[in-house]
Every structure is written in C-alpha cells, then in structure tokens.
Amino acid sequence: MISKTTRRYALAAVAGASTLALALTGCSAGGGNNSGDGSSDRALRVWAGSQTPIEANYNPFAPTVLHGALGPIYEPLFFFNKTSDSEPVGLIGESYEYNEDGTQITVKIKDGLKWNDGKPLTAEDVVFSFNYEANNPEGNGLVSAEATDETTAVLTYDSAQYTTEFQRMGSSYILPKHIWSEVDDYMTFTNEEPVGSGAYKVAKTTKESYSLVANPEYRDADDLGVKKVQYIAVDNNQTAQDLLAAGKLDWAGMFIPNPDSVTGNGKVEWINTPQDPTVLYTCSNADLGCTGAQTDVAVRQALNVAIDRNTIKEKAFVGLTGDASPTFALLPRDEKWVADAANKTSPQEADPAEAGKILEAAGYAKGSDGFYAKDGQVVEMSLTSVDGWTDYNDAAKLIAEQAAEAGIKVNASTVQWQEFSDSRQTGQYELIMGGVIGTSVADPFQIYRDWFGGEQVQSTSAVGTEIPSGRWNFSRYSNPVVDQAVTAAVSTNDEAAKKELYGTIQTEIVRDLPYIPLVINATQTFYNAKDYTGWPTEDDLYAFPPSWGAIAAGYVLPKLKPSN
C-alpha cells in the first residue's frame, strides 16, 4: 500500500527413463560431474514444469518462454517478495521516487552494470524497455521515458501510477537496446541466444534439457555459489517425483500428496506457501466468440454453488490448500480490501438445490436424464486439465461428479501442455482447470487489471486471436463497470477511495464469475537442503520459493551455496 504522495525507496542490493538418464549425465556445458554432493563443479538440477521436447525460446514475452529466462536471465528493475508485505529490493535499480502527483517516476539504476555480452547497461536501455511495445501496451498511459544521465531514467504518465507500482518497477523486463531494437516481431522472436542482466546465461539447449552458467558480467558475479544450472524436461509430476526421491533433482515446485516419499533420501526438504488461486477458467463472452453453456452467467453461478470445495481440498490437495475468495483478495493478507464480508470466501460445501433454483430461474428445466436443459440444449461442458498434473486432474474429476449431482454435465479430460496453452490463449475451450497468478504486493489490483479488464479492455481478444503478451484475460471478460473502476484505481493514492472502487469491482466479478475460484493452491517446493544452503524457508521466506516462480527464481539462485 502507498501511504504518501511523494516518497523514495533506497533499496538494498540485495520423457522416457533412458532419455532422462542421458539428460542428467554430464549436464553442464563445462563437463561437470553428477556426484551426489553439492560441489561447485556440478549443475544444480531443476524441474520447473518444462515439457519434452524442449524448444529453445528465451523470449520473456512469449507464451512458451522457458522458465530460466524469467529472472535468471532477464530481470525487472526491482524484486517484490510476494510472500510478505515488504519493501522491494534493487536488482538493476537502485531507487525510485514519485513526484507529488504520482505521474512521474524517477528511477536510479546501479552504476557500472553490464549485459552478459559485456556491453554497458545504462538508463538508455531502461528508457528503451519502457517504450518497447511488449512493456508498453495500448492504454499503458506512458507519455514519455527519458534518460537524464547514464544512471537516471524519468518515466512520465498521463495519470498517477501509484497502484501500478509492481507492474512498472517489478515486472517490466529490462531489455538490451542493442539487441531488441533489431527485433521486427517480438511475438515470433525465439531469442535462442539471450542477452540479459541476470546471474546466468544460456550454455546449451537440447530437447531433453537446457543449461545455464554463471554470467561473468553479473553485478555480483564473485558471490555466485552455484555456477551451473540445468533445467530438465519432464512431462508429468510422477516422473519428477521419482527423480526427487532418487536424488536426481535439486529443486522442483510441484504437488506431491505424500511428501515423505521424497524426503526419505536425507537430502530433500519441502515448504508449502499457498499464494495463487486455482480456478475454473470459463470462456465467458459469447459476443467475442465463446461457445458453450458456460457463456450463460446463470450456468456459471449454478456450477459455483454445486462445487464441494471441502471435498476437493481434502481429496485432490490433501488439505494443503487455502480458502479462495471470489474477490480474489489473498486471505488473510488482503482481508482489508474485501468490501462485503459475505464475499470473503467462496462456498465451501455443495448446494445442489441452490444450483437448481438458479438454473430454473433462468429458464432451464431438468430432463428425465437428470440434467438441466434449455431450448433443447443440455447444460453440458468440457473441462480440461494438463495431463500429469495429478492434483488438478483429480480435482477436475471431483467437479464433474459434483456437477452431475446438481444436474450439470461436465466432461473432464486431460490434454498435453501445449494444447492447454494454445486453447486458453485463443479462447477455444469451455472450462479449464488452471491457476491465476497471485499478486506480488498486498493488494488485489494486479489481478483486477490483468485478468478482468480496465486499461487493457480495448485489447480484449476475440476467440481465435491470441491474448497479447503481458495480459491474462483468458475468459474474454468485458464489463464497462469493472473497466472504469480499474482505470480509476490506477491513479488513486487514497485508501478509502481505493476500497470503494474495489467494492464496485468485487460486486461485478462475484456475480459474473468469469473465473470460478476453487482454492488457494498448495504451492509445494522441494529442495536439496543437504548439498545446497540458502533456500527460502519458513524462518526466512525472503522470496516465493518454487522453481517455476518468474523473477523470484532469479533472486533465489544467486543466494544458494554448495555445502562443500
């Protein structure tokens, strides 16, 4: 939360088994070993959900970007720890200051920075990055970006930008002007030899894995304990779980219902940090080409009350999840932003009778087969989840069973990651089990803007058109009341005014349910605590710990040290 109009942050510098066996042998570009210790001459082995075969794409704006690009290679100006309400930490940036009306941000970057190709990183690169289309979509409000000297950039907007602090300072990737100024189409650029500012650079990319090595030009290169990192391709949780148990993985963010199965080797420890909502994406907007029963708000409302979240929490997520709020405020962290206590959490128990009342009031009638229909069309929807994501797969099956008890037909099936990604990007789906990226500051604004509309509404994509980079409105939701409130919230520094605007947004999205909240996802991280030290722990949760965490992974890796 921003409590002053003018302020300054002085920031601290702070596949098959045989294929996998080959991928994990001699995994570093420098010919390191795979001894069972944390010696500095072997790669730290990571699974971040990469599918096989791996395709080289290190473009931070691409939907299929490899995880190692986001933080370990490319960085924003500052790091925001989404696990706490704390001050941001300088990465490229040293400090930033708002002017009195919040329309201008003066950023100081660290002196003497270099890109991993040895060229200087200056304020001109920062200015280029903020002007770059992928960081500056339509409606972004940027009037000008100017470098007043080599370490100072001044960003001027057409309105106060207090609420967009994280978007500007914590999630806009800084790009080397001498590389990206030559890129004609950033959406198709695969960027196979990325030039970044982070602690690592690409050494080798194969279909089975990709390897990063320490960047000698990194600002704190002498302090890097882990010199090599290997990201491996695994198609499913079970294989990754087996590799953890066998001591073949050092870091993974994944769901394992029986953690003892991987901690028995004396190396692996784990932590659970629920942060991100798991939801049912609904392609909700018929005007933009969505098809299916879920385009009717009454069907979405009925399905919402037909779901038994208590059962899903226990059976699919073994009690490791948190309660989701239909306001998308993270509880208890963001409780003060919930305008109506009745909307604090989604219904935890199923109410098939209430689901029936909602449908009947909307003109549906239950047929002899036990399912509701209207105008000859049965309320029937397909629900997909990614094959191998066992927690999501189990939850989808439970939802199908629970929906049937309320007279709603849901057909659950699994698809490969690429099909999942393509369908949500293009809107060619009915229901999807998926996650929403939780906010990195103690404020739900980021979700309201990125997932529901506001300043980005003009770019809400029709079905068949991909969602632009940096936007997440997969439901194709469009509501002018929400748009106006989100846009107004960008400019306010008054907490009471912001609460009122959030209340308006919450009333609309709780009713419309373009994303049906299920749980706050169990976010388990498994890490090799025997061979490496410096991991985020419950006692020192300095960063969001899973290996797939964008930006945070690039903050964690430089803090790790081999044990011997």
Image: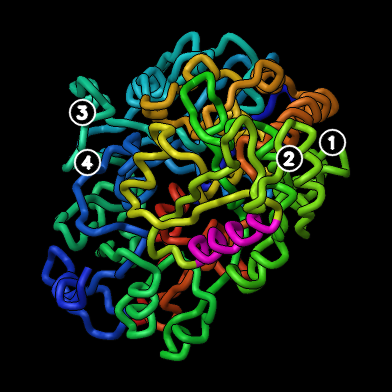
Task: Check if mark 2's residue and mark 1's residue have beta carbons within 8 Å.
Answer: yes
Q: Which is more N-terminal, label 3 or label 4?
A: 3
Image: magenta residue range: 391-405
Tag 4 residue: 194
Indicate the quadrant where residue 223 lies: bottom left
Q: Which is more N-terminal, label 3 or label 1?
A: 3
Q: Quadrant of the N terminus?
A: top right
Q: Which is more N-terminal, label 2 or label 4?
A: 4
* The disc label shown at residue 327, or none: 2
Labels 2, 3: front one: 2
State the SS at label 2: loop
CA distance separating discs 1 and 4:
45 Å
User: Which secondary structure is most common in the magenta stretch?
Assistant: helix
Q: Which is more N-terminal, label 3 or label 2?
A: 3
State the SS at label 3: helix
Labels 4, 2: front one: 2
* The disc label shown at residue 339, or none: 1
Tag 3 residue: 179
User: Is residue 332 visible to the viewer in this orientation of the structure?
Assistant: no
CA distance separating discs 2 and 3:
41 Å
